[in-house]
Amino acid sequence: MAIVNRKCNSIVELDHRPELLDSPTGRSFANEELHRCLITQESPPQESEIVIIGGGIIGCGIAAQLWHQDDLRNNFIILDSHHELCGNLFDTWGRIGQRVMRSPYDHHIAPDGDLQMLDFARLRLSELTEVERQQVIIGLSGQRAVVPVDIFIAHTRHVISTHALQDRSYRIRVKKIVKLSDSSHNYSLILDNGHTLLCNRVIVAAGNEYRELNGVWSRALENFPDQVSFCDNPQRPSRGNRILVVGSGMTSAHTLVNCYKSGCQITWLLRNEERYRCADFDTAFFRKEGIARFEKIPTLIKKRELLVEESRGSIMLEFYPILQELEHNHNIDVLRFIEPTSVIKHHDALSVHFNNGSSIEVDQVLLATGITPATSVLPKGVLLHDGRYPELDTATLELIDYSGVHVAGALASLVLGPAAKNVDGARLASQKIIPALQSRDQIQKSYTIRGTWPVTPPKRRAI
């Protein structure tokens, strides 16, 4: 029933061994300084020229790029609600038991000229397992190689501390962005402590949030919070528990394997058949030719259709033999092509009923129903296609009608394509945002010197 795509953009077909998933976690590599990535400041200044909303992978990746620009290095701050830069993602990986990355070694947040992740791993070969060392060698040949989560986290923390991003970061949440008309600044950021922060330019790198649930799971989550939760909930299933895992992506795969190892009785619910592929979308979209192909798609409708297709859940190829064996040996029951109709409390268990007339009883439901771009911080009234993608200036990633508000990550998908949401999306977004910031900075300097704006402002291109 599974759809398997073994193309990995490789010169030769690679060995997709299940052992590649077994990297140890929790290792502390030499020179890794966790404390230097913690956000200790909670009171941001009253104003800043540039504000990055979001201190995750995308936000920190862009910040590291800004640090290398002499004219921008001292003009930005980062706002994030977590206690550690990129910490929300790292915590999520820990809760679902993720051990390896799906992205290859060349996807990381270090700017060109800095220590790249593959070289970072080479410097720590003696601390890696034999399988991990073999993957580093494969990566050196330019092929797809599996990256241990420990290496990715340690390298990311190295980039953060090297650029001292924690020194310009503040632990606070932005509630909304307000456009100003009669002010020396362009925007006011409303913070969750009731204060405001004035700025001229904003980079929204707010990451993702849980996808909106259908009525059945939404009500179950509300009515039975002790037994229905998302997979990254810290509550661990106990041995012998009957677990229903809902979803068809990487989170569900990690959850299934970990629940099996914990001695649980598992049922896997899939809306369609599961898909296995090396990357979470066509690897061509990582490269210039793929991005150019996406840009040439003539209509927004066609772009949105492609994004929907490429955002469908899929699982790393290394999981394929594991999950196939678990199903074949009846260690997990797989329910495909059915939908839930109700969830009812029955004694201490939950009775889940489906549209084909069947039902099962479980002790716990774990949801891996996907994520969607976080849009709540965007200015009020911004048009969202499919409820998640704003319309942008193709040259600068600025929101239409909100000059100076740039977006990155999944929010930039209508311009950058499927790769926008990936780790490498920080680099792709920076290539458009940074020149725009520098150009606007030059215009501002011209205005300060001459006392007048250019008669004809630069023409903007909208998608």
Image (spheres, grey):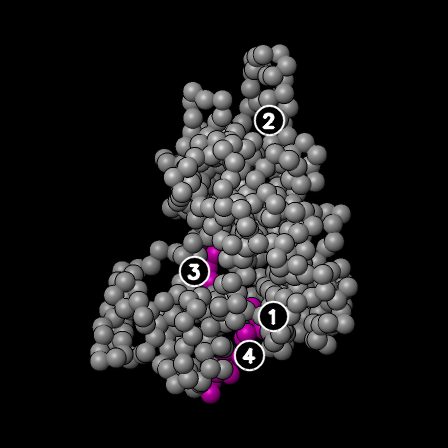
Question: SS at mark 2?
Answer: helix
| Labelled pair 2, 4 in contact (Cβ < 8 Å) | no
Q: CA distance from mark 2 to mark 4?
A: 53 Å
Mark 4 vs mark 1: in front = 1
Please give the residue where the numbered disc 3 appears in the rendered image: 370
- The residue to which callout 1 is attached is 26
Is the N terminus in the top left, top right, bottom left or bottom right quadrant? bottom left
Label 1 sits on what residue type? Gly
Image x and y of residue 169, in percent? 56, 45
* Left or right, residue 358 beside residue 315: left
Q: Residues within 10 Å of mark 4 (few under 14, many from 20)?
A: few
Q: Please identify the quarter of the rendering in which residue 181 is found.
A: top left
Q: Earlier in the sequence, mark 4 or mark 1?
A: 1
Residue 78 vertical position relative to residue 282 in the rendered view, above or below:
above
Residue 238, given in percent of the width and then of the height, sits at: 40, 81
- Dot in front, 3 or 1: 1
Q: Residue at x 49, y 77 (%)?
A: 258
Q: Does any portion of residue 295 appear in the rendered image?
A: no
The residue drawn where x is 75% and y is 67% is 124
Residue range of the region highlighted in magenta in the rendering: 307-329
**In front: label 4 or label 3:** 3
- Would you name the residue on which mark 4 appears? 321
Q: Position of residue 295 (x, y in %)?
A: 56, 41
Residue 312: within the magenta? yes
- Say whether disc 3 or disc 1 marks the residue closer to the N-terminus: 1
Camera-side residue of 202 and 294? 202
Q: Nearer the viewer, residue 189 or 414?
A: 189
Q: What is the spatial separation of the Cα atoms under label 3 and label 1, in whole angstroms?
A: 26 Å
Residue receiving disc 2: 440
